[in-house]
Image: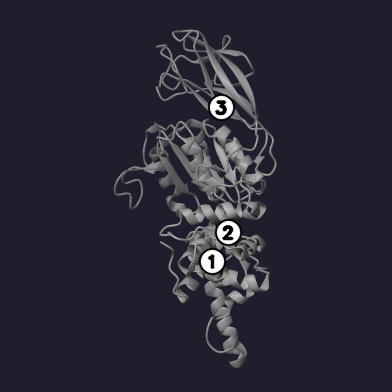
């Protein structure tokens, strides 16, 4: 069964210790056949979608399963007609030791753990699908992705907002045997709480008010491919056991439905939260964390890999929409970028460059083409950090035109400063969270209604 001994941090390379399993048929129609499985749930039965498919007529469609848990590896009968036996004892659930023989129907199988230790070395490439970086930190990430992408292992990607978690998940899918299947994204923090279960698992017609027709959930839509569960740390606690069941059983039941449907999906999840701390605080289930973090990969923030800035700038400018003439940044801009904290990471860098392109006259981004906040940073060579963690340049809130602040009454000057600050802060906040008001409110430690009120006040709409 797949298991990783520790988190694989991008700045702390080590070996990945994966535990896989081999099942060998000793007696029955499949005698002599072996199945090598790297999933954390192995389904045994006559059902074609299972990991171990048997043609023995005494074997039920869903006969038994082998499940990796934090306490060990469990063999569990699934209510089969003819039972599951270890020796002469009919079992409902039992922990498996290495080389354990057990019988399903008239078929005898042997369970053998097959450990594999993978040395993680930095990749020789400076890119992996949509991810770019020549720094050691990023090439170590690429080295890990090269090894885990071809497997079916469940992956948990952690990192700050804007570090490229969705790009990493798409890269995992693109380099897997599922690349020809669907890649479905579900943002656990964006869907309303009362609709999350329906979005995940689907619903039947009439299951609740407004369910005018049956709809599949994202797990059904991802069948045969990969599902990316973004912001998994935002999933409500009451829904976590239901997600755990789907991960273990690989089957879903729509709301209002009576039948379950098997789904063949690989799960990649992401969060900018520390899930270990969430588990300790009682906000995230330990068993769900254990199921998701078969491989846990931490992406480095941009400030930890500033040597990648020139390569990233060229890459982002080349990929920018409607850019035909700007290919790099000037030395002065490069120096400024290296001094900046980049709270929004690569996503913020991409936004800055996108804004600068229309104002760039030659083939380089110059200081004059940068947003006002960064131009202010160029002259002051310093930033202040707000309690929300957003780097804010003091001069950025000053109006571009009009009388000097000292030429008008103090109260009017103060009101102007506050108005300008509110607008700049909201624009940056919403941009860093892709227009998601709920995420923006959490990041700013504000009530969602306060954010929407300020948006209305300043005429700010969500980015399309």
Above or below 269: residue 345: below
Numbered tag placed on residue 428 in the rendering: 1
Q: Position of residue 84 (x, y in %)?
A: 51, 16
Above or below 248: residue 20: above
Q: Which residue is mark 3?
A: 67
Mark-to-mark CA distance, 1 and 2:
9 Å
Mark-to-mark CA distance, 1 and 3:
45 Å
Q: Which residue is mark 2?
A: 344
Disc with the residue nearer the chain's start (1 vs 3):
3
State the SS at label 1: helix
Numbered tag placed on residue 213 in the rendering: none
Disc with the residue nearer the chain's start (1 vs 2):
2
Which quarter of the rendering shows the N terminus? top right
Mark-to-mark CA distance, 2 and 3:
39 Å
Q: Place residue 143 in its image quadrant.
A: top right
Q: Position of residue 41 (x, y in %)?
A: 53, 28
Q: Residues within 10 Å of mark 3 (few under 14, many from 20)?
A: many
Q: Place residue 55 in its image quadrant.
A: top left
Q: Residues within 10 Å of mark 1 (few under 14, many from 20)?
A: some
Is residue 179 left or right of 165 when viewed as pictured? Answer: left
State the SS at label 2: loop
Q: Position of residue 397 (x, y in %)?
A: 58, 76
Is residue 387 left or right of 450 when viewed as pictured? Answer: right
Disc with the residue nearer the chain's start (2 vs 3):
3
Query: 28 or 363, which lies in front?
Result: 363
Q: Place residue 320 in its image quadrant.
A: bottom left
Tell me which residue sits at (66%, 69%) in the image.
Answer: 383
Tag in front: 2 or 3: 2
Is residue 316 left or right of 283 when viewed as pictured? Answer: left
Q: Are marks 1 and 2 in contact (CB under 8 Å)?
A: yes
């Amino acid at each position: 069964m797949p298991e990783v001994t520790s988190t694989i941090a991008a700045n702390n390379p080590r070996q990945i210790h994966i535990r896989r399993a081999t099942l060998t048929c000793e007696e029955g129609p499949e005698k002599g056949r072996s199945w090598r499985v790297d999933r954390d749930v192995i389904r045994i039965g006559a059902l074609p979608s299972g990991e171990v498919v048997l043609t023995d007529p005494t074997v039920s469609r869903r006969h038994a399963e082998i499940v990796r848990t934090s306490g060990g590896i469990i063999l569990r009968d699934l209510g089969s007609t003819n039972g599951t036996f270890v020796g002469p004892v009919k079992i409902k659930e039992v922990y498996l030791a290495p080389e354990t023989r057990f019988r399903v129907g008239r078929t005898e199988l042997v369970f053998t753990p097959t450990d594999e230790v993978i040395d993680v070395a930095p990749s020789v490439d400076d890119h992996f699908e949509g991810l770019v970086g020549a720094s050691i930190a990023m090439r170590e990430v690429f080295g890990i992705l090269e090894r885990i992408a071809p497997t079916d292992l469940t992956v948990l990607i952690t990192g700050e907002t804007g570090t490229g978690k969705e790009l990493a998940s798409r890269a995992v899918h693109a380099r897997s045997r599922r690349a020809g299947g669907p890649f479905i994204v579900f943002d656990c923090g964006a869907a309303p709480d009362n609709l999350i279960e329906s979005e995940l698992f689907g619903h039947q017609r009439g299951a609740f008010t407004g369910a005018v027709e049956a709809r599949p959930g994202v797990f059904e839509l991802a069948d045969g491919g990969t599902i990316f569960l973004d912001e998994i740390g935002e999933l409500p606690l009451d829904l976590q056991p239901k997600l755990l069941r789907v991960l273990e059983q690989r089957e879903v039941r729509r709301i209002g439905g009576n039948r379950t449907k098997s789904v063949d999906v690989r799960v990649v999840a992401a969060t900018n939260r520390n899930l270990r701390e969430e588990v300790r605080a009682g906000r995230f289930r330990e068993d769900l964390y254990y199921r998701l973090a078969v491989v846990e990969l931490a992406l480095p923030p941009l400030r930890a890999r500033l040597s990648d800035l020139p390569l990233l700038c060229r890459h982002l400018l080349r990929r920018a929409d409607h850019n035909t003439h700007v290919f790099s940044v000037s030395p002065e801009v490069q120096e400024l970028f290296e001094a900046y904290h980049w709270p929004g990471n690569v996503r913020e860098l991409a936004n800055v460059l996108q804004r600068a392109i229309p104002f760039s006259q030659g083939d380089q981004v110059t200081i004059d083409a940068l947003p006002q906040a960064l131009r202010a940073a160029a002259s002051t060579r310093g930033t202040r950090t707000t309690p929300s963690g957003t780097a804010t340049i003091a001069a950025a809130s000053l109006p571009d035109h009009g009388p000097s602040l000292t030429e008008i009454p103090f109260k009017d000057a103060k009101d102007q400063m506050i108005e300008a600050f509110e607008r700049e802060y909201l624009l940056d906040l919403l941009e860093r969270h892709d227009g998601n008001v709920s995420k923006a409110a959490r990041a700013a430690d504000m009530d969602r209604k306060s954010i929407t009120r300020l948006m209305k006040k300043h005429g700010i709409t969500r980015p399309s």
